[in-house]
Amino acid sequence: MSNRLRKSWVIGDNRGENTRETFEPDFERDTLVNLKLLFVVACALVDPDGRVLLARRPADKPHGGLWEFPGGKVEPGETPEQAVVRELREELGIEPCERCLQPFAFASEPHGNDEHLLMPLFVCRRWDGFIHPVQGQSVAWVRPEHLRRYAMPPADIPLAVELRDRLVSGRVG
């Protein structure tokens, strides 16, 4: 016996006649409707020497001790850019230039049993203030070719690889 659902649709053709098509959607695909979207943002701060800032996650949080691009959850009513500015202000005590945030890439992956993570990564080369980890986390300025030396959460890994490749080749503005 199959776990697939059988649905019939009546579709009008160009002559006004009805035709019936039956399909069996994939059960896993149907369950995606019930997933909660976890919308978070991340930012690769790039200094004048081309180094990228990574922050170490607190030990008591998921993925504790791993290195990541700074960022966090997008609050209701916020744009992704506003969330980046707020998160960098709260986490690092800096004021990034919102107009200078360059959309770069995104990660999309399962996050637990009933959530799906969507994380756009922005690149920022201009901000006001000095990096001061407000929440006491460790930070490191890392050359792009050394990003993979740092253990990262799964969503950050492909972003770090793409960032490395494009920074090294000069394809990021």
Image: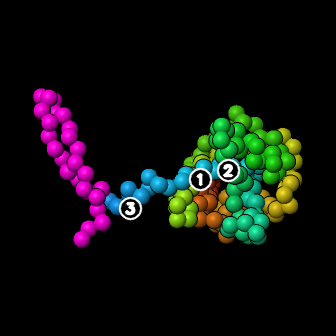
Toward which corner of the image does residue 152 lie, by quadrant?
A: bottom right
Q: Residues within 10 Å of mark 1 (few under 14, many from 20)?
A: some
- Magenta-colored span: 1-25
Figure check: 105 above or below 148: above
Observer-nearest residue: 116 or 148? 116
Per the image, the residue denoted by label 1 is 38
Residue type beneath disc 3? Glu
The residue drawn where x is 63% and y is 51% is: 40
Observer-nearest residue: 132 or 145? 132
Toward which corner of the image does residue 150 lie, by quadrant?
A: bottom right
From the top left corner, tell me how far across and down residue 16 is, in percent: 14, 29
Choose mark 2 or mark 3, whichever is in front: 3
Residue type beneath disc 2? Lys
Mark 2 vs 1: CB contact within 8 A? yes
From the top left corner, tell me how far across and down residue 74 is, in percent: 66, 46
Image quadrant occupied by the C terminus: top right
Image quadrant occupied by the N terminus: bottom left
Q: Residues within 10 Å of mark 3 (few under 14, many from 20)?
A: few
Residue type beneath disc 1? Leu
The residue drawn where x is 14% and y is 36% is: 18
Give the mark, 2 or 3, whose residue is nearer the N terminus. 3
From the top left corner, tell me how far across and down residue 10 is, in percent: 20, 40
The Cα–Cα distance between marks 2 and 1, rounded to whole angstroms, is 8 Å
Q: Residues within 10 Å of mark 2 (few under 14, many from 20)?
A: some
Residue 2: say if magenta. yes
Lateral position of residue 129 relative to residue 49, left or right: right
Lateral position of residue 64 relative to residue 135, left or right: left
Is residue 52 visible in the rendered structure shown here? Answer: no
The residue drawn where x is 52% and y is 61% is: 114
SS label for mark 3: helix
The Cα–Cα distance between marks 3 and 1, rounded to whole angstroms, is 19 Å
> Residue 73 has which mark?
2
